[in-house]
Amino acid sequence: MSGYQLAEDVSLAGRNTFRVPARTAMMADVSRADALAGLFEFARLREGPVLVLGEGSNLLFAGDFPGMAICLTMAGVRIVQEDADSALVRAEAGLNWNDLVAWTLARGLVGLENMALIPGTVGAAPIQNIGAYGVEVGEFIETVEAFQRDTGQLKQLAREDCALGYRDSLFKRESERWVVTAVELRLPRRRELRLDYAGVKEELAAMGVDAPRASQVAEAISRIRTRKLPNPAVLGNAGSFFKNPVVDAAVAEAMKARHSTLPVFPGGDGQRKLSAAWLIEACGWKGFREGDAGVAAQHALVLVNHGQATGAQLLGLARRIAASVHERFGIVLEPEPRIIGARFDEPAA
């Protein structure tokens, strides 16, 4: 058995949560990590670009993809080792992220509850160093298993070798070199719940919970996310389109002095994070629509496809939003999703 299946000229419309039309010259569904060496050898002979796809929840296709798209389908999860205080959980790249959150909580393991309902797969989690409501996955990563394309080997990378940052990692910076195949997370059985992020305590109170368990925090956050963010199954989107900009503390203080309602968060190393949603809304984009490309009415950070928008149209809208924020506030916005077939900082030809 080869461990993968190939098909030519495949539609990607159902493989990206923006639901924009795009096709790939070849698609490979991979069921075993040890099949990647042979698959990449085959891809090298074809001499086209290679793209690794999860659920397509953090991608924008600006056009068709001329090479081979690889989809990892292995989705196993198990406890590798455990003691009285914690457990080491190994999850394969194709597993749905929220399913992993539920699986760990059901086994009395805590830590991932604040990241409930983040779309996508486990394989994407370390690439983006996903996070929400004050918690990042990097806090729990012990090891990332990844296929190294230039050597043809499966490697185990310790957390300190993964260069994890805010929505950043070695795997994101060197996306042409690495394919994440599994993640091992060290999860505690007890830890202080993080409830100080906007709206969490209020949601728990509305649920009638005064001494919350981790599973109840996950439910509260799922309720908040469901209200704030459009469902990609109903309205095509990739969640937050822009990162919260990180600036020097002095810049943040000057901005706050001029705009008292601007949310500012700690950014590490004496820096601050500004709310991209606030900046975009202040420029009047919330709820904007042009054709089928638009900005969600619930949340200014979310670009949406109302039906027939192309990736190029959504990219053009995103560039206009970023330009208006820069013109008004002098702040540079960067996209969170990976843009395939174009660069964000280059105008379309």
Image: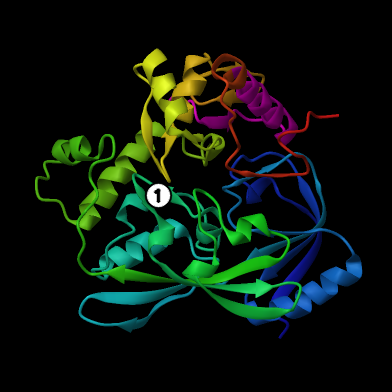
Residue found at x 84% / y 74%: 42
Q: How is the image coloured?
A: rainbow
Relative placement, left or right, of 72 versus 26 is left
Position of residue 277 relative to residue 162, above or below, is above
Asked if residue 284 is among those painted magenta in the image, a careful observer would answer no
Left or right, 75 with respect to 224, comes to right
Q: Position of residue 63 (x, y in %)?
A: 78, 41
Q: Which residue is pictured at 21% across the width and 37% down the height?
A: 203
| Of residues 124 and 173, the one drawn nearer to the viewer in this rendering | 173
Residues packed near mark 1 inside 10 Å, few (<14), some (14 to 19) or many (20 plus): many
Residue in the foreground of this view, choosing between 90 and 12: 90
How many numbered markers are drawn?
1
Residue 66 at x, y percent in the picture: 85, 52
Quarter of the view holding residue 197: top left
Q: Nearer the viewer, residue 32 or 164?
A: 164
Residue at the extreme bottom: 1
Q: Is residue 132 above or below residue 33?
A: above
The structure residue drawn at horizontal position 36% and vertical position 71%, both measured from the top left corner, is 186
The residue identified by callout 1 is: 117
Q: Is residue 105 above or below residue 198?
A: below
Identify the amino acid type marked 1.
Leu
- Identified at 30% across, 55% down, the residue is 113
Whole-percent x, y for residue 243 in the image: 52, 38
The secondary structure type at the circle numbered 1 is loop
Span of residues in magenta? 298-324
How far across and how far down the image is residue 307, in percent? 63, 30
Left or right: where 2 falls relative to 256: right
Whether the magenta-drawn stretch holds residue 308 is answered as: yes
Quadrant, the C terminus: top right
